[in-house]
Image: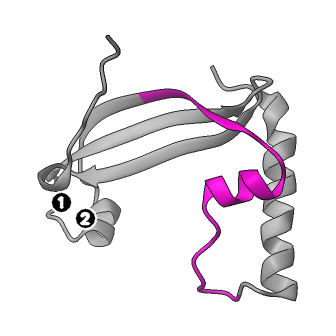
Amino acid sequence: MFRAGGMAIWQQLRADIARQIEDGPLSPGDALPSETALAAAHGIEVWRDDRRFSAVPATPDDAAWLEAPVGAPLLLLRGTNSDTRGRTVAHIVHRIRGDRAEYGVRVPR
């Protein structure tokens, strides 16, 4: 499922972010560019490969970050994005509070 070939692209993007922090316009603490902005800057078309959803209890770290009780239900979203050649360019991991989650699907006709 995870393809190592795309990691070279991630290394390039990571180096670009590091340059922007070192040489401007980014400073430590600034919001990083979105994946969409990075992909456009490097001429990469990004596709969502897969998404998996799981219910998990909040760990102590999760609880602190999400301001939720330890053990509270979270929605764990995991997946990958790839370029048009099938190389993985991003690994996605999100933890979402269960009381703030909404999942929508557009069903093709």
Amino acid type, mark 1: Val
Residue positioned 14% across, 53% down in the render: 72
Tell me, yes or no, whether the two marked residues, 1 and 2, touch with CB atoms within 8 Å. Answer: yes
Residue positioned 25% across, 40% down in the render: 56
Picture coordinates of residue 99 (x, y %)? 12, 53
Q: Could you tell which of marks 1 and 2 lies nearer the N-terminus? A: 2
Residue positioned 87% across, 42% down in the render: 8
| Placement of the N terminus among the 4 image quadrants | top right
Q: Secondary structure at mark 1?
A: loop
Q: Is residue 37 magenta?
A: yes
- The quarter of the displayed image where residue 25 is located: bottom right
Q: Which mark is residue 70?
A: 1
Amino acid type, mark 2: Ala
Q: How many marks?
A: 2
Picture coordinates of residue 47 (x, y %)? 62, 32
User: Does 7 sit above or below residue 67?
Assistant: above
Magenta residues span 27-51
Q: Relative to the observer, which residue lies in front, 43 or 19?
A: 43
Q: Relative to the observer, which residue lies in front, 71 or 54?
A: 54
User: Does 63 sit above or below residue 1?
Assistant: below
Q: Residue furthest top?
A: 109
Q: Is residue 66 left or right of residue 20?
A: left
Residue positioned 16% across, 52% down in the render: 71
Q: Which residue is mark 2?
A: 63
Q: Secondary structure at mark 2?
A: helix
Q: Residues within 10 Å of mark 1 (few under 14, many from 20)?
A: some
What is the C-alpha distance between the residues marked 1 and 2? 5 Å
